[in-house]
Amino acid sequence: MQRKIILALGGALGLVVLILLVMRAWPDVRAENFTALARARWQFTLVPLLLLLGWETVSPFFPFFQGRRDERLRHGARNVFLGVLNAALAALLFAGLWWAAAEWAERHRCGLLHLVALPPWARVLGAIVLLDAWLYWWHRLNHRVPFLWRFHRVHHSDARMDVTTASRFHLGEVVLSHALRIPVILLLGARAWEIVLYETLLFAVVQFHHANIGLPEWLDRPLRCLVVTPAIHKVHHSRLQPETDSNYSSLCSVWDRLFRSLRLRAHPREIQFGLDAFDAPPHQTVPGLLKTPLEKDRRPGTEG
Ligand SMILES: [Zn+2]
Ligand SMILES: [Zn+2]
């Protein structure tokens, strides 16, 4: 009972903080202010991270770290370390390239979003939907193409998925996906501030659906019509390959419905996360995670 009260109070406080953040960022969205939005992005990363860490502490869905605070800290630190490494690489190498591609597309009126004159709200909505559709197919390719799966399995080898798993991606996957984003920006004609807005929304939702939390069915059901919820993404991290190869959506859940890849579990507490071949402790250290793509893939149906 006491746990429910803490959760309700924390949830209400978190919701107020998020609403205040949205209200603060709203003028910058309306003004299409790239710099201010890029700054706000960090707030929309850190505030959800802290709120979800608190939620996982008060009411974890799986008791991975019960009475093992040090282990939780080590696990989170490794995942966040990869996330910081990836964010630094993205800022140093790709932010400028994305911005230049978006500016070039804007100047030359290149890309799908320049084909028809849309009102500003429809344009930004179109940019978000199209960028998300690309991410769905890119994620699906990561499961289908053996070379890409070598990198992507770093994300899937976490047997104790929590909010920090949202940051656990191999540098190689980040380089490939960020480099491919450049032709996508040109093809779509997305503007720089639209890309920042999409990335901000995306990572907040990605952190939410990786968190070791469970929503009551009355809340998850309507929410999962719109975005990917923890109930959807838990199935994607299952050890069973047909479940791993499902639920590829990242922000909007519509893509899995549209392309028939949605799977749900009636009893999500029975799901086991991770990859059998990568459970051993040496695979879970930072050097082990970085070396994972070099390991022979023992997944049936991908490589010999
Ligand atoms: Zn995946
Ligand atoms: Zn995931």
Image (cartoon, rainbow, N blue to C red):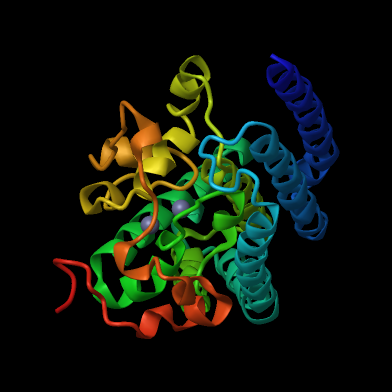
Q: Position of residue 143 (x, y in %)?
A: 29, 62
Q: Residue furthest front?
A: 67
- Seen from the viewer's position, the closer of residues 301 and 70 is 70
Q: Quadrant of the N terminus?
A: top right
Q: Is residue 115 something that shows in the picture?
A: no
Q: How many numbered dots are placed on residues in this image?
A: 0
Residue drawn 70% across the image and 22% down it: 3
10 sits left or right of 122 in the view: right
Q: Is residue 89 something that shows in the picture?
A: yes
Is residue 189 shown above or below 12? below
Residue drawn 36% across the image and 85% down it: 294
Q: Position of residue 117 (x, y in %)?
A: 53, 44
Q: Quadrant of the C terminus?
A: bottom left
Q: Position of residue 28 (x, y in %)?
A: 81, 46
- Seen from the viewer's position, the closer of residues 258 and 81 is 81
- Seen from the viewer's position, the closer of residues 234 and 70 is 70
